[in-house]
Image (cartoon, grey):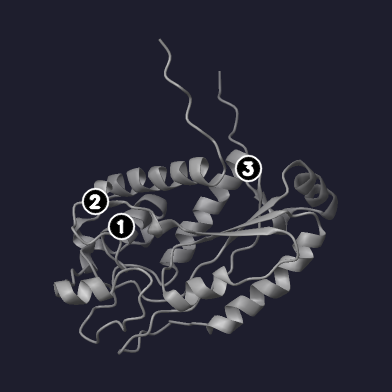
Amino acid sequence: MSQPAPPAPLRLKEMTPDETRAAFAANPRLIIPVGTCEQHGPHLPLGCDTIIVDRLADDLSAEFRIVRAPTVEYGVNDETDHLFPGNASVRRKTLRRWLNDLLPDWEKAGVEEFLVLTMHGHAPHQEALGTVVTERARVRVIDILAIDLGALVDGPTGPIHGGEVDTSLLLHVAPHLVRMEQAQDFILPEQAVRRYRRGSTMRLPAISPGSVGQPTRASAEKGRRIYAFIKDRIRRRVLGVNPPLPTG
């Protein structure tokens, strides 16, 4: 006997107004994925961040029946000393204004809580998302790589741009887009690593291949574990779903 098909995500752009009204009445939350269009090394596509939060938004929408908005494809990129073809960034005030224009319309339609998903820790990007204003609705910005993933990786530096974590996640979500034969490790001196932690505004050095960290340590299995850990953390910390108690 065949298994029933898993529920499909509630993608706002595919829904009618009546379907949207009913979905907001049943669950007055909206997921908004916010990505970037920037380099993550020679082995990863420019939309690495976007592809991962896109998948996470779909999975959370399907599981919890939360409507998900169309993805915002651009963010506030890190500064670099080298031109990487294809990079496209918006200014902090542009990203903030973009969301400030959109959220009031969805709030009028019944949304009481916005869940903004991103995986880009650049301080101006986070500031733009964290200063969005609504009339009554709650805005929660979820930077998925701000979660402590140290126990799930081999490298000592954690989730640094285009490194072990980013590469593992994309090997899990979209392996056909990863060019592992082109992955290059780029290790910063320890004093520079401390300044390059997530949330810093340090420029990417010109000698970097476009990434920082050790992508050669990445694997699809690590990506599967990291992805499951992130999703479970959002379930429990954001959506308030606790794991079942052991029996027996």
Q: Position of residue 47 (x, y in %)?
A: 45, 69
> What type is the residue that disc 3 sits on?
Ala
- Circle 1 is placed at which residue position? 165
User: Between residues 224 and 139, which one lies in front from this camera angle?
Assistant: 139
Q: Secondary structure at mark 2?
A: loop
CB atoms of marks 2 and 1 within 8 Å:
yes
User: Between residues 238 and 74, which one lies in front from this camera angle?
Assistant: 238
Q: First in sequence: mark 2 or mark 3?
A: 3
Mark 2 surroundings: few (<14), some (14-19) or many (≥20) residues within 10 A? many
In the displayed orientation, state which residue is furthest to the left: 189
Q: Please name the residue shown 43% across and 82% down the image.
A: 86
In the displayed orientation, state which residue is furthest to the right: 18
Q: Nearer the viewer, mark 1 or mark 3?
A: 1
Number of labels in the image equals: 3
Q: CA distance from mark 1 to mark 3?
A: 27 Å
Mark 1 surroundings: few (<14), some (14-19) or many (≥20) residues within 10 A? many
CB atoms of marks 1 and 3 within 8 Å:
no
- In the depicted structure, whether residue 101 falls above or below residue 64: below
- Circle 2 is placed at which residue position? 153
In the displayed orientation, state which residue is furthest to the top: 248
> What type is the residue that disc 2 sits on?
Val
Q: Position of residue 187 (x, y in %)?
A: 16, 71
From where the camera sits, is residue 242 visible?
yes
Q: Quadrant of the N terminus?
A: top right
Q: Quadrant of residue 224?
A: top left
Rendered image: mark on residue 154:
none
- Circle 3 is placed at which residue position? 8
